[in-house]
Amino acid sequence: MREMQVGKASIKFEEPPVIESMASIVGKKEGEGPLGKLFDVVEQDDMFGADTWEKAESALQKQTADLAIEKGDIRKKDIRYLFAGDLLGQLIATSFGTVDLEIPLFGLFGACSTMGEALNLGSMTVAGGYADKVMAMASSHFATAEKQFRFPLSYGNQRPFSASWTVTGCGAVILSKHKKEGIAAITGITTGRMVDMGIKDSMNMGAAMAPAAFHTIQQNFDDFNVDENYYDKIITGDLGQVGRTILLDFMKNKGHDLETIHTDCGIEIFDPDSQDTHAGGSGCGCAASTLCSYILPKIKDGTWKRVLFVPTGALLSTVSFNEGETIPGIAHGVVIEHIGN
């Protein structure tokens, strides 16, 4: 038996999968932000050499996957499964971007929580003995997201301060079966459920996602019988400034003070003052690229011994939004730990 159930939504791995390799590629704006020097590649051409925005995001995924394989000195044929997704309808960035990899694909949609979903499923697959190596990957692109969910870029609409800026970026990790060396170990997961608080404002996704982040973090605490002191950092995906404030209030009402140990990928990746990104960053590539550039290196070098990584997603579509539906949120938790003393 390689894992054990510890609660309603969580698994603790007796033989934790190891992150063997990682890669992050972002666009020009992300490279100008606070994490700019940490990404593997900052692409100055947001078209990535393609002739449409959608092809650009596919190229971004392919380049990131290839880089993760190259950095780990891994053969493609040794990767049993690929768990990957994006924000576009029918996952076209993923399906077109990964076809040449020739790796069996599970296409995932968890909105901006997709990297958490990929890590949950990939970890269970490796820990359960169904694969020696898998890849988890997620991407987003500012222009493809704006085109699909909001307005054409040439429209020049005014964005409210609660709005976030979709990250042009991709992050990929390769998970391997348990061993004593690697970048970090995934010791447990907490799979989120949909939480709908009736939010309908697509320009305030932080408010839609914060209740789901709260539920997953609290579920993690309950299932593992821990509290915030168990972690060096609790890092959500893209709540931004608005969502972070709501999350901290929810947690405080439950007796948990996350003020000093919580941060958010959407807050870390941009400078709101100099880059005019309002609430912060968002998109599948926000949590994925921040994980692979900023979070995992700090776990590897022991700065943080144990991190609860909680990518968050707003599960809306153009159809649901235009029909006046609310925006359910979801968040998936991943316990990532330093390997060694």
Image (cartoon, helix red, strand yellow):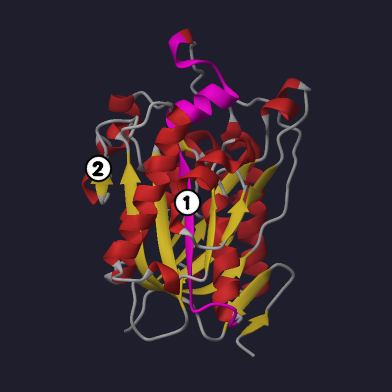
Which type of secondary structure does the marked residue at label 1 adopt? loop
Q: Nearer the viewer, residue 183 or 329?
A: 183
The residue drawn where x is 46% and y is 45% is 97
For this view, does 52 lie left or right of residue 314? left
In this rendering, the count of numbered labels is 2
Q: Residues within 10 Å of mark 2 (few under 14, many from 20)?
A: many
Is residue 218 placed above or below 162 in the rendered structure? below
- Give the farthest residue toward the bottom: 1
Based on the displayed image, in which of its 4 quarters is residue 295 positioned?
A: bottom left
The residue drawn where x is 24% and y is 33% is 44
Comes first in the chain, label 2 or label 1: 2
Which type of secondary structure does the marked residue at label 2 adopt? helix
For this view, does 282 lie left or right of residue 23? right
The residue drawn where x is 28% and y is 26% is 274
Which residue is the site of mark 2? 36
For this view, does 24 lie left or right of residue 211? left
Question: Magenta stretch?
Answer: 129-154
| Residue 98 disc label | 1
CB contact under 8 Å: marks 2 and 1: no
Is residue 29 visible in the rendered structure shown here?
Answer: yes
* Residue 324, position as x, y percentages in the image: 77, 23
In the rendered image, the quadrant that contains the C terminus is bottom left
The residue drawn where x is 51% and y is 18% is 160
Is residue 263 visible in the rendered structure shown here?
Answer: no
Residue type, mark 1 in image: Thr
Find out whether residue 134 is within the magenta segment. yes
Based on the displayed image, in which of its 4 quarters is residue 43 positioned?
A: top left
For this view, does 272 lie left or right of residue 1? left
Residue type, mark 2 in image: Gly
* Residue 66, position as x, y percentages in the image: 34, 56
* Residue 63, position as x, y percentages in the image: 34, 49
